Image: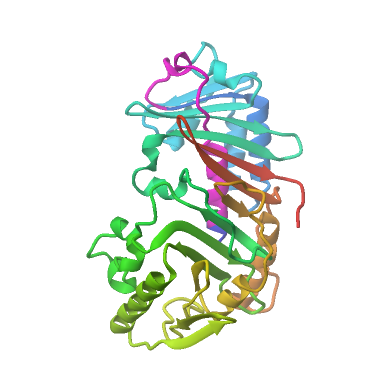
Amino acid sequence: MRRTLVLACVCVALLAGRCPESESDTAKLPEGVVLLARTAAVKRALEHFMQIEQTPLARWAAGLHQSLPTCPLIEGHAATGSLADLWPTLTCARAATGLDKSLGEHDIAFASVRESQQVLGLVDVVPDGGMAVDVSVPRSFSEGRFGLLLPDSKSAGASVLNGDGTLLHSRIRPSAGLDLASLVSAGSQGAQMFRLKSELFAGVVLDGSVEIAVYLPESGARMPLVALALGFQYRGAAITAMDAFVGELERTWPVARSPFRIGEAEGACLLELRLLPELAPCYVATEEALILGWNPGSLRKSLSGATDSLADLGEFGGMTIDLARFGQADQILSRAFTGPGEPFSVGFPWQRLVATGKPDRNGFRVQVQLQSDRRS
C-alpha cells in the first residue's frame, strides 16, 4: 500500500502537462523530457516530499534539493525521455525555450516529446503544501492500456459504491473501453489462473463504466476491504456471463460456489479460493451493476450506505485518495502481521489527492490536486 501511494505522489509531481496556447509554443521543444521551473517552487515541492520520512522518495527529494543550482530559474533536458536522466541535467536557465510562454506565472512547466507526440503541462506549488497539476495528453494516448486511465466522452455515471471510509475511490468510463481480455495474452498466468479472457472481460455485456473502492481494513484484518462495480448494458446477459465466469473458475480450481445475497441483490462466493490473504471472492448483481468483492465483508461494506465521495468530481468521474487515513490503515495492517508493538506508519504532508479528467478538442485534460486542508 505504501509503495502504491509513493508511486501516486511521484506521478503527481512529475507527470504534469498542459497543451500550449499556440503551435509556436512547442516548435522549439526537443525530443525527450524538458523542464523549466522556478527554483524556489521546486525546493518547496521537494521539501513536502522530504516529509514522507523513511521512504526512498524522501531520500531522493533530499538529495535533489541539495543539488539544485542557486538561481531563480532552472531548466533541464533528457533526450532519452527518462526522468531519472533529467535530474542530473538541471542547471540555471540561460536561453529561451519552447516552455517560456507556457510557464507564465506558474511554477513548473514540463514536457515530454516522443515521435511528434507531446505531453505538456503546468504545476503550481502553494505555500501551505498543496500542489495543483494540469495535464493534457494527445488523443492517441487513448489507444492501448493508457486508454484505461483516460475518460470517454460519455458520462461516467453516478457512483454505486459506498464512499464512507475509503482509502481510494475511483469511477471512470475509460476511453479505451473495458475490453480487458484483449490486453491479456492467451498463455499468460492471469489468463490461466483467473480466466481473464472470459466473455465477461471482453466488454460485450458491460457498458464500459467501472468503479473501485478500497476501504480501511477492519481491526485484525491483513487486507483492506476492496470492491469493484462493473456497469452492464443488459442485466440478464451480465448475470449469465458472470455465472459462466464463476463456472470456469470452478473448473480451474478445486472450489465450489456458495449462494450469497445482500438484500434483493443475489450472487455467489468462492469461499475456498484463498490464493491471497483473506481472499474469498464474492459478487452480487444489483439493478445498476455487477459488484465484485475481495470477500463477503468487502461487499457488505460497499453496499452498506449511499455516501458518495465522488459527487464533486464532475461528469466524467475521477479518483480520490484519502491520504489522511493511510496512517490508520498502516497501523491496523502492521498489528495484524507483526502483533503488538509500535507499528510503522508513513505520514503524508497532504490530506487528500483528487484527480479528474475530461476529453477536449486536443485529446484529454487531467487535473490533479494534492490538498493539504483536512477533510472528512
Q: Is residue 242 left or right of residue 21?
A: left
Residue located 71% across and 51% down the image: 351
Residue 92 colored magenta?
Answer: no
What's the image's color scheme?
rainbow
Residue located 31% across and 61% down the image: 181
Image coordinates of residue 94 in percent, x first then y, are 54, 12
Image coordinates of residue 47 in percent, x first then y, are 67, 39
Which corner quadrant of the image does residue 244 belong to?
bottom left
Q: Is residue 128 left or right of residue 123?
A: right
Quadrant including the C terminus: bottom right
The answer to whether residue 56 of the structure is visible from this angle is no
User: Looking at the image, is 179 positioned above or below residue 48?
Assistant: below
- Look at the image and give the residue range highlighted in magenta: 4-32
Q: Nearer the viewer, residue 287 or 177?
A: 287
Which corner quadrant of the image does residue 123 belong to?
top right
The answer to whether residue 291 of the structure is visible from this angle is yes
Residue 13 colored magenta?
Answer: yes
Residue located 47% across and 64% down the image: 230
Q: Nearer the viewer, residue 212 or 110?
A: 212
